[in-house]
Structure formats: structure tokens, C-alpha cells
Image (tube, coloured by chain):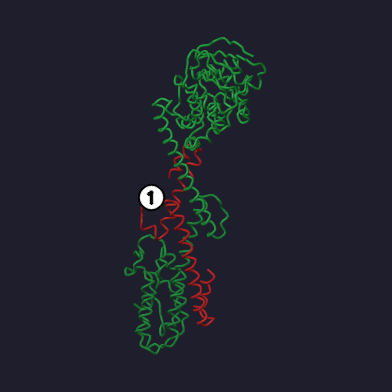
Chain colours: A red, B green
Amino acid sequence: MSSRRSSRSRQSGSSRISDDQISDLVTKLQHLIPELRRRRSDKVSASKVLQETCNYIRNLHREVDDLSDRLSELLASTDDDSAEAAIIRSLLNY
Amino acid sequence: MSSNKRSVRYDELVELLWRDGQVVLQSQVRREPSVQVQTHKHDQALRKPNNTYLENQETIRKHNENVQGDQETVSWIQYPPEDVVDPFESEFSSHFFSSVDHLDGPNHPKKPLTIKEAAKPEAKAMAPPKFWPPVVSVGPSHCGSNQSTNDHQVTHPPVSMSDRSKNVEERLDTSSGGSSGCSKETESGRSVSISRKRKHAMDTDQESMSQSDVRLMPTDDQTMGNKSSQRSGSTRRSRAAEVHNLSERRRRDRINERMKALQELIPHCSKTDKASILDEAIDYLKTLQMQLQVMWMGSGMAAAAAAAATPMMFPGVQSSQYINQMAMQSQMQMPQFPVMNRPAAQNHPGLVCQNPAVQFQMQAQNQMLSEQLARYMGGFPPMPATTQTQTVQQPMDMMRFGSQVGQQSQLSTPVTTDSLRMGKTG
């Protein structure tokens, strides 16, 4: 990133390290996101990675909520003292 | 009060004469046009005689321009700060102001002299200037520096110059933009050049601050051809730098705002620095993905169990199909799913959210899940064996995640006759 270059020249060595670190973390994050993982290019901008991360997290949240609802439904349909109920409850409280 | 200062060479001092209520600079170099130009600008300014400041300025101007002939009348710039005067003033006015403030008498050769030395003479006929408040304020700061610098007006400390430049910059459209992006030195250089140009000191070194020139001089033609080219070059450059800075800033702002949004999404995130936020985001993402995997498995199992639990009178094929589906979904190799379902051997983490396909990342997790499922299966209510026979087989396969599932299952034996058994058969 250009900011990395400029900060390198301007700031101390510590900032230089963190800039690389940050870029590393952004790459790692990119690998976790299925949409961006496909691209596999180094040119994905940090801004895009961050945006996709936020979207992905929101999707995951929604999915968790859906699954929780489903599990609670399933729980209602089982015997309360059965093992599966226990499992479902543990899943819900995950 | 007319005083005859010692005449100086064009580079050094200019003789100041007070004539007809105006300070007249006498210098060797005669510069009509520049003087005229200057005069235009300055004409607007009030001509105030009896201004020592004027003298100083004049001398400096004369230096700069080298133009003033013997009888040149320098019209002092009255100026609103935005005027041409600024660049000019930035250079000299500082000295002037300081000197003016101190000067009581009409002529203080010393200051002008020093200034002259510093500045290239750009003789202009100017009416005694009125001190402009902004200029004046700047003056004292500059004064010392000015005096000290002999060489070039540019040598003024960048700070002081920048102050002046700022005045100038407001005026300058593009130049100001560029200058803001530029370093202080550039600005000071620019202001210096501006003043020069204003004086139209062709002979004096003229900076390439064409922008100021443009602004200052209504007639750019006066400036030399090279000046205009320099001007456009520097204008372009500073414009590009400015644009670059703006876009850079915009990009940074965008990233910062997305970081903030991410931080809000992450629960219990108390860090505010980028690296930590990114770190926590990565961990949180992995946690979420794992959680979803488990939940899918659990819900799949629960659904299967629920389906199996209800007495199914229809052929087991149906339920087995259903269970097959679950099995397919939970199996590690699921090539039919469009979403990057790679073999579990690969180390790709990540859960496909679009479908309940689950991919186990690690054997440990698989084992954990299989144990859970085994336990669940063990407690499963007995199902009619006859109808469930076929279904039993499939669930077993389904339950078998990888190879270890069966071994680790803790299924109790009573299950054998009933519903799903894990790892006991096949």
C-alpha cells in the first residue's frame, strides 16, 4: 500500500513493522472469506477485504440465528430428557 | 523626507529618494515594464508618502527587479492581503514590517540595505505602502530571518515563509493547492519567486512558481517564456500531488470507517488499533465458522433423529433418502456441492454458508462431533427394525466421518436392534 511506503519513510521502524503486520492480517482475513479466497490475488484492497469481512460476519450471524431457531424447534419435538435434547441444548448455548 | 541613500548596485542597494511624496528608487537597472506592472497592482493600493516601510520595500523591490532607474517611482502596494503583494510581501514584507515597525525615520538604509542584499532588486515604483495587518504580523517573525539571510529570499525560514505563503496561497488557486501538498520549502520558494515575478524582475532569479506569477501579474506575458512553462509544469505537478493526497486521504478514510464497522461487529472487542482489530476479526471468524459447522451437524442429526423418531409408515427409502442427504451433506467429500467443498484432506477452513454442507477442518473437531453424534444416536429411541433396516445402514455410513467415527463412538449396545448404530456394522 502506498501508505505503507510513505509511513515507512516518515515514521519510525515500529510503524514499519506494524504496516507489514497489518497487511499480513488482511491477507489472512482474506483467506477466511470464501468469496475472496477464490480470487487469490494479492491485489485485493484492504478496504474491500474489510467490507467483505463485515458482510460475511453478518451473514454468519444470520445463519447462526436461523440454525438456532431450527434447533430450538427440533428440541421442542424431542423428549426433553433424551440425549439429543441435551445435544441440541448445548448447541444452542454454544 | 527625502534622503539620499548611497546608491547601490543593482544587486545591493537602491538609492531611495523621496520625491513628490513618493519614494523614488534609484537603481541602475531600469525596468519600466515591470515597474508598470507592479504599479498596476499597487496603484490600487494607497499611495502613502512618508512611509519608511515603503522605503524599505522599495529598496528591496529594487533589488529584486534591478530595474529601477534613477527616477523610478515605486508605488507602494496598498493591498489587500490577497493581492499580488503577498508573495512579494512574503519575501520582503516581513523584513519590511519588522523594519518598518522599528523605523521611525523616513530612511533607514540599513534595513533596506540588508533586505536589498537579500533580495534581488526589483525596482518598482510604489506608493508608500500601508501596512497590512497580516503582513505586519508576519513581519517581525520574518524580519530577523530576513536580515540574516543574505542570499535569497527563499532562505527565509520555511515556517515564516509558509505563513506568508499561506496568504499567498489563498490567493493562488492551483498553486495554493499544490503548495499545500508541497513542502514548506516549496512554498517559500514559490512565494519568493512570486514576489520576484511580481516585481517582474526578469533579471532576478525567478522561481518556477508560475502559479503565483499568474496570480500576481495580470499579464503573464511579462514573465519570460520559460517562466510560463515552468509555471505550468509546477502547477501540474502540484496539482497532481494535491490530487494524490486527496485520493490517499479518501482511501484511508474509507479503510478507517470499515475498520470501525468491523470492530462493532466483533463482540467484546475492546481494541482500537488496526492490528488488534484484525486479529480479533480473524479469530472471531474462525470461531463463527466452527460454531456453524457444529450447529449444522447437530441440527442435521436432530432432524434426522426427529424424522426417524416419528414412526414412518412409508417405505424406508424415503427416510433413507432424507438421511442420505444428511449423510451427503455431512460427509467430507462432497463434490456435488458447488461451493468449494474440497476434500477434507485439504486444509481449507471455512464453512459454506449457502448450504448446510459441512467441512471438517480438523480431525479433532470431527472426533468431537462424531462423539456427540454417537451419543445422540445411542440415545435414540428404538425404531421399528424392519422398516429401518435400510435406513440403519445409511446412517451408519453417514455417521462415519472419516475413519475414526466408529471407533470413537460410545454407542451402547442396545442400539443394535434399533435405529442407527454407529460404527458397529460395516
Q: Chain of mark 1?
A: A
Relative horizontal placement of residue B59, taking residue B358 as reference (left or right): right
Residue nearest the observer in this picture, A6 or B370: A6
Q: Residue at x 48, y 32 (%)?
A: B215
Disc 1 target residue: A43
Of residue B151 and residue B22, the one placed in the foreground of this image is B22
Question: Would residue A75 appear left or right of B231 to someone viewing this image?
Answer: right
Residue sitting nearer the eye, B140 or B420: B140
x, y (%) of residue B291? 48, 66
Which residue is farthest front? B20
Task: Look at label 1 and name its amino acid.
Answer: Lys
Instruction: State which quarter of the image contains the C terminus of chain B.
Output: bottom left
Q: Residue at image x 53%, y 11%?
A: B8
Residue B240 against residue B119 in the figure, above or below: below
- Vertical comparison of B29 with B212: above or below: above
Quarter residue B108 falls in: top right
Q: Secondary structure at mark 1?
A: loop
The x and y percentages for residue B368 are 46, 68
Instruction: Looking at the picture, tell me which residue is in the foreground, B64 or A47.
Output: B64
Residue at 36% x, 56% y is A39
Residue B214 vertical placement versus B293 (above, below): above
